[in-house]
């Protein structure tokens, strides 16, 4: 490729990146209703809850901290989609939405499984957000808590 063609391609890419900034997704933080949250439905030790919020809160609560780069397309599209998907799957501040004990127990089991398999928080998130990493002891305490809730619930955790 000659220089003129490279300049045209770079200019086209730059214009494209500027134009896509017009198309921003809606970044929301719905109101928090304490009576719908996980601690309102399941006994959670304060340390475990703070670890969950620190590691999982940006995608699995209504208190997402939207960093500056979440306002830059195309990253904004990916990040907003990840947060919305995380909230749909499990929202620690809308535990009541799970509806029945089996679904709540499945989520509690899933929390432990994802942490053990290092699926959550996702690697890409851990790279940028060092605070989200769980120590081995934190992972053990979260898993011990979730397993004890499931064992003691007899299939009824999550709905009061």
Image (spheres, rainbow, N blue to C red):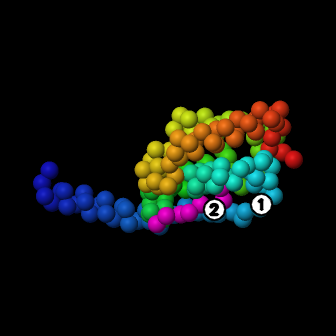
137 over 129 or under it: above or below:
above
Q: Where is residue 49 in the image (x, y as percent from the top left)?
A: 67, 52
Query: Where residue 51 is drawn, which disc sits there?
Result: none
Examine the residues drawn in magenta and state their main secondary structure.
loop
Is 66 displayed left or right of 34 in the figure? left
Residue 157, quarter of picture: top right
Tally of marks: 2
Q: Where is residue 4 in the image (x, y as percent from the top left)?
A: 15, 60
61 over 102 or under it: above or below:
below
Query: Where residue 63 is drawn, which disc sits there?
Result: 2
User: Quick one: which residue is furthest to the left in this view?
Assistant: 2
Does the segment drawn in magenta span residue 69? Answer: no
Residue 158, quarter of picture: top right
Give the magenta part as a residue range. 61-68
Q: Check disc 2: other Cα within 10 Å, few if <14, some if 14-19, many if 20+.
A: some
Q: Position of residue 95 (x, y in %)?
A: 75, 49
- Separation of residues labelled 2 and 1 (CA atoms): 12 Å
Residue under the point 77% across and 48% down: 43
Is residue 137 at least partly visible in the picture? yes
The front one of 58 and 69 is 58
Residue on which the image places disc 1: 34
Q: Check disc 1: other Cα within 10 Å, few if <14, some if 14-19, many if 20+.
A: few
């Amino acid at each position: 490729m000659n220089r003129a063609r490279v300049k045209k391609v770079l200019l086209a890419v730059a214009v494209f990146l500027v134009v896509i900034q017009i198309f921003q997704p809606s970044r929301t933080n719905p109101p928090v209703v304490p009576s719908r949250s996980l601690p309102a439905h399941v006994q959670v030790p304060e340390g475990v809850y703070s670890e969950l919020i620190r590691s999982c809160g940006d995608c699995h609560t209504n208190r997402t901290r939207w960093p500056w780069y979440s306002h830059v397309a195309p990253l904004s599209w990916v990040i907003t989609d990840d947060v919305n998907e995380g909230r749909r799957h499990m929202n620690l501040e809308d535990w009541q939405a799970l509806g029945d004990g089996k679904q709540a127990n499945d989520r509690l089991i899933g929390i432990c499984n994802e942490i053990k398999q290092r699926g959550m928080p996702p690697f890409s998130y851990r790279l940028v957000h060092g605070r989200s990493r769980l120590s081995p002891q934190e992972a053990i305490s979260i898993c011990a808590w979730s397993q004890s809730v499931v064992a003691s619930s007899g299939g009824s955790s999550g709905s009061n």
